[in-house]
């Protein structure tokens, strides 16, 4: 389906984590769509990218440089491979952290073939010297290789064949404007709607030779956090449960029972997410509470709570970040089946300004 595949990705510790582990990478390689027609979701991006690629083929030219931004697992790597396939060109894959020196980038660029697609994942993590070299390579298809040191150093211009750079980033705001401006096409990948994830799950189940009913796919889709990679991972775990505990057919009841075993609830929250909410609600009355205090209460590092748990909780409207600290929303109380005390609404936004 539509998943990213960074080669240096660490093994995730969470079933609902969006980083690909080795198992994900192996399965995704077999499930990736091969062209834009097979790619599910991201309708606007697909339509715009199709126009860019069709126009380039009609001109007999290489496609414009493409920048794809969005959360992990939404399809950036898959789209880069589709771009290469649609243009009939080979693709080379690397990542920003792997390019620590300008020489590393020069070696890659100098070996590119004409029309080749260079996919640079996590492009915002590339070193500054390499980034500055990339400016000229993207715009003029030329790099200056410095030979020697000190006063005797000379710059040797090296002409490059026309190529297409596809950059991917999870943090577009960290890209400097000069780099962003050199991309001819920029697209932001959105989270998927449940109906789109159901199509993803049905397609994956068909390729994996798994029998799944419509209500089973809907149950998995609703817990997949809007991310195809997570939907695919949950499908595999539910498949395992169905083969061991049932007749191998995934229904709503089977999917629900399986994901209960793996501690993924109806909204896609796992143990860490619920631990943060429970600490916030039960120990601190819904907040506000400081991040460090909340992390100690959960027994996790501050960075884990802030970077792993909070983004999804905020996106789901279960938690709010305020200048005074973290605050639970009414939806958080409802999700955990708890009744908020009267004090929970005081200092919890605009309501208390009017004494309500």
Image (tube, rainbow, N blue to C red):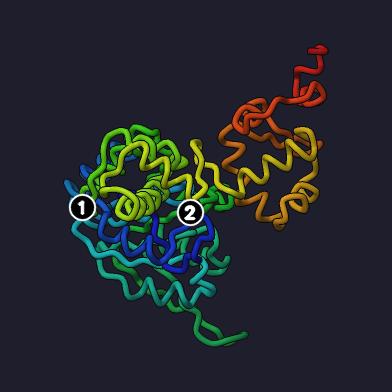
Q: Earlier in the sequence, mark 2 or mark 1?
A: 2
Which residue is rendered at x = 76% and y = 47% of the image? 294
Determine which quarter of the picture holds residue 168.
bottom left
Q: Which mark is residue 15?
A: 2
For residue 33, say whether it is visible: yes
Q: Is residue 85 above or below residue 328?
A: below
Q: Identify residue for label 1.
A: 209
Of residues 157 and 300, the one nearer the viewer is 300
**Residue 175 shown left or right of residue 60 in the figure:** right
Of residues 146 and 291, the one nearer the viewer is 291
Q: Kindly report the distance in space between the C-alpha atoms of the residues bearing marks 2 and 1.
A: 22 Å
Which residue is rendered at x = 46% and y = 68% of the image? 8
For residue 65, say whether it is visible: no
Q: Is residue 104 above or below residue 248?
A: below
Residue 335 appears at what percent x and percent y? 59, 31
Which residue is rendered at x = 38% and y = 73% of the image? 108
Residue 269 appears at what percent x and percent y? 54, 42
Residue 45 appears at what percent x and percent y? 34, 39
**Residue 123 shown left or right of residue 204 in the figure:** right
Residue 327 appears at what percent x and percent y? 73, 34
Q: Is residue 155 above or below residue 198?
A: below
């Amino acid at each position: 389906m539509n998943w990213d595949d960074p080669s240096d990705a660490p093994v995730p510790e969470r079933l609902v984590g969006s980083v690909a582990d080795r198992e994900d990478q192996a399965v995704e390689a077999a499930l990736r769509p091969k062209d834009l027609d097979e790619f599910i979701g991201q309708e606007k991006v697909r339509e715009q990218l199709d126009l860019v690629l069709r126009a380039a083929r009609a001109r007999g030219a290489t496609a414009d440089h493409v920048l794809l931004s969005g959360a992990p697992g939404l399809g950036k790597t898959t789209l880069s491979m589709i771009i290469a396939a649609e243009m009939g060109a080979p693709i080379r894959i690397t990542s920003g952290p792997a390019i620590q020196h300008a020489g590393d980038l020069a070696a890659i660029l100098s070996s590119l073939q004409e029309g080749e697609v260079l996919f640079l994942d996590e492009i915002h993590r590339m070193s500054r010297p390499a980034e500055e070299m990339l400016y000229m390579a993207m715009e003029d298809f030329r790099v200056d290789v410095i030979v020697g040191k000190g006063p005797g150093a000379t710059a040797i211009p090296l002409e490059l064949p026309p190529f297409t750079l596809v950059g991917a980033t999870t943090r577009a705001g960290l890209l400097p404007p000069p780099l962003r401006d050199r991309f001819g096409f920029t697209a932001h990948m959105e989270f998927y709607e449940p109906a789109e994830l159901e199509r993803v799950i049905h397609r994956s189940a068909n390729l994996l030779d798994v029998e799944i009913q419509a209500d089973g796919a809907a149950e998995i889709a609703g817990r997949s956090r809007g991310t195809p990679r997570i939907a695919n991972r949950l499908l595999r775990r539910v498949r395992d449960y169905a083969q061991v505990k049932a007749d191998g057919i995934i229904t709503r009841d089977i999917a629900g029972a399986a994901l209960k075993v793996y501690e993924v609830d109806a909204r896609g929250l796992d143990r860490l997410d619920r631990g943060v909410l429970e600490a916030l609600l039960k120990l601190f009355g819904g907040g506000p509470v400081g991040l460090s205090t909340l992390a100690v209460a959960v027994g996790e590092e501050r960075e884990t709570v802030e970077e792993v748990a909070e983004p999804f909780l905020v996106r789901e409207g279960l938690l709010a970040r305020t200048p005074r600290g973290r605050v639970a929303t009414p939806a958080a109380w409802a999700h955990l089946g708890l009744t908020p005390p009267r004090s929970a609404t005081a200092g919890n936004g605009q309501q208390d300004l009017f004494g309500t």
